[in-house]
Amino acid sequence: MPPSHRCKPLTPIEAAIPPLLQSLPQILEIEAVPLEQALGRIIGSDVAAKINVPPHANSAMDGYALRAADSQPRGLVQVSQRIAAGQVGEPLQAGTAARIFTGAPLPPGADAVVMQENTRAEDEAISILQAVVPGENVRAAGEDIVAGAKLFGEGRRLRPQDIGVLASVGLTQVTVRRALRVALLITGDELVPPGTQLKPGQIYSSNNYTIAALLRNLGAEVIEMGVVGDKFNTTRSVLKTAAKQVDVIISTGGVSVGEEDHIKPAVESLGGLDMWRLAIKPGKPFASGKVCGKQFFGLPGNPVSAFVTFVLLVRPALLSMQACDRPFSDWIDVPAGFDRAKSGERQEYIRVTLSRDTEEGLSLQPIDNQSSGVGASLSISDGLAIIPPHTAVAEGDKLRYLFFAELTN
């Protein structure tokens, strides 16, 4: 290995992220998509409500709508009408009540609902067992959303519950950032697609499935460039072709310094690298730069390293490119349920399970095998925990923890 590779210090991740984000191109074009296709997309302009939700005062209970003043205990009130959800009642006469069901509009003149459990039927009337006050058991018009209110601001990434809110004000589509077009290429002569008969020395390609799924979860359009053999000219040609079609190029493998690692020199011949080799474990060979002016991310080839660097660096970068207001996942502090010797010079991201003890509360337990080649450990674990450089862990120490479920929000 040349001395420059041995001696050049690794970049801490906290120092790498700000210049990475500043170097990113912005993809701010917008498009209108149906609500059914809007999950995970980033809102392109503020969205305001044009109607109240609910549009009219309605009953929060099955019961009887009346004037609160007519609900004296042991009072007898005539039932003048019946109003089911979706129906509109007649104006209520003083001293009468309307049989009403949950969600049905209050008839004009009523200001409260006495729930049926607090009444007793008396032929065509009811006996009030417990008085109500004005507004009791009533959902006011606009109680949920007021017409004119801003629902979501530009840059919000839509969650399932947000889609429901947009539907509740009658929208059928929403304006969002254009989907990023991402080329995904996998390097390695040893890789073959699932379904192929393995020959000696071959393994199935899995990184493209993992990374493509993570990309689609972000609403990206994935262009599969396939498995690229370990040849410089082939690698360079595929990169050049990809750059003509997409906003972003992502590769896995080939970013280290071995004789068969051609991604780095190929990228440098078509643009350049802004970042290479981070002080993290796993994921040290991560690279970022430009290929023919398009954003490039080079992930390591080991499955855990590829996943971790995507989560830590690529995911927030892609969201930032679309001006997402929350590009970073939320980490929380959780006590360690284990002891661990002092770590090395790189910040470690270990795979852990989240233990839920009814007496002790939450704690983290490490997966036994932390090798970056053990892809199944990502499915066994619940998330990642950070161990800073040169740090020993004692049971009870608080560690920063990222729940993998956060990546699907």
Image (cartoon, rainbow, N blue to C red):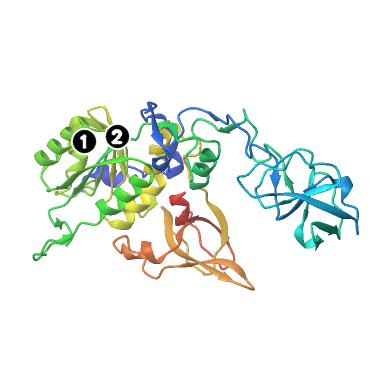
The residue lying furthest to the front in this view is 123
Q: Quick check: 180 above or below 204?
A: above
In front: 94, or 274? 94
Residue 297 image point, x, y percent:
30, 40
User: In whole angstroms, how far apart are the C-alphas of marks 1 and 2?
Assistant: 8 Å
Amino acid type at image mark 1: Val
- How many marks can you see? 2
Q: Is residue 218 left or right of residue 254?
A: right
Residue 110 in sight from this viewpoint: yes
Amino acid type at image mark 2: Gly
Disc 1 element:
helix
Disc 2 element:
strand
Going 18% across and 36% down the picture, which residue do you hit? 239
Residue 127 image point, x, y percent:
85, 59
CB within 8 Å, label 1 to label 2:
yes
Going 55% across and 66% down the picture, which residue do you hit? 363
Residue 11 in sight from this viewpoint: no
Q: Is residue 300 left or right of residue 24?
A: left
In front: 358, or 398? 358
Residue pointed to by mark 1: 267
Residue 250 image point, x, y percent:
27, 42
Q: Is residue 282 left or right of residue 14?
A: left
Residue pointed to by mark 2: 289
Q: Quick check: 101 above or below 144?
A: below
Residue 5 image point, x, y percent:
26, 44
Query: For the residue carrying disc 1, how many other residues have a C-alpha within 10 Å: few (<14), some (14-19), or many (20+)?
Result: many
Going 39% across and 67% down the picture, which residue do you hit? 380
Query: For the residue carrying disc 2, how many other residues have a C-alpha within 10 Å: few (<14), some (14-19), or many (20+)?
Result: many
Q: Earlier in the sequence, mark 1 or mark 2?
A: 1
| Image quarter of residue 134 | top right
Q: Is residue 204 left or right of residue 233?
A: right
Residue 232 - label: none
